[in-house]
Image: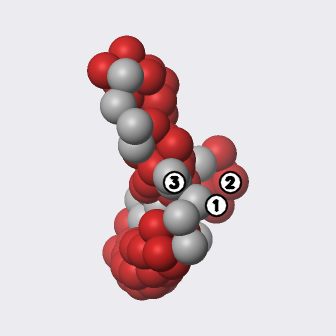
Amino acid sequence: MAVIGTSLPTAAGGDRTQMIVLVTTIACSMGMALPISTPPNALAFGTNLLTTQQMAKPGVILAVVGLLLSYGLIAIMQLVGFFG
């Protein structure tokens, strides 16, 4: 997904390439709610001491908080003129 998200705006020649790449990168790093999302999650899940529900609850909370923070970061960066 990150490769598509970074190559698409570059190929389109849009003036918001940096913003799309940054948002895509942040979104890809938020995929931590499930056991198969990262190798450490898979290892922890593989011990059979955790269930998917036990991993999903804090993962969803972190994803929502991260989404709100990333929206705030993008809004602040637009206000200060980072994206031109």
**Vertical arrangement, residue 52 with respect to residue 68, above or below:** above
Question: Which of the 4 quarters of the picture holds residue 39?
Answer: top right
**C-alpha distance separating marks 2 and 3:** 35 Å
* Helix, strand or loop at mark 2: helix
Q: Nearer the viewer, residue 10 or 62?
A: 10
Q: Nearer the viewer, mark 2 or mark 1?
A: 2
Q: Is residue 54 left or right of residue 49?
A: left
Tally the numbered discs.
3
Q: Position of residue 9 (x, y in %)?
A: 37, 29
Q: Nearer the viewer, residue 55 or 66?
A: 66
Residue at numbered disc 1: 44
Q: Nearer the viewer, residue 23 or 84?
A: 84
Residue at numbered disc 2: 40
Q: Position of residue 23 (x, y in %)?
A: 44, 53
**Vertical arrangement, residue 9 with respect to residue 69, above or below:** above
**C-alpha distance separating marks 1 and 3:** 39 Å
Crowding at dot 2, Cα within 10 Å, few <14 / some 14-19 / many 20+, comes out as few
Quarter of the image with the N terminus is top left
* Helix, strand or loop at mark 3: loop
Q: Earlier in the sequence, mark 2 or mark 3?
A: 2
The disc at residue 30 is none
Q: Position of residue 73 (x, y in %)?
A: 52, 74
Residue at numbered disc 3: 83
Amino acid type of the residue that numbered disc 1 sits on in the rendered structure: Ala
Crowding at dot 3, Cα within 10 Å, few <14 / some 14-19 / many 20+, comes out as few
- Could you tell me if the residues under marks 2 and 1 are in contact, i.e. CB atoms within 8 Å? yes
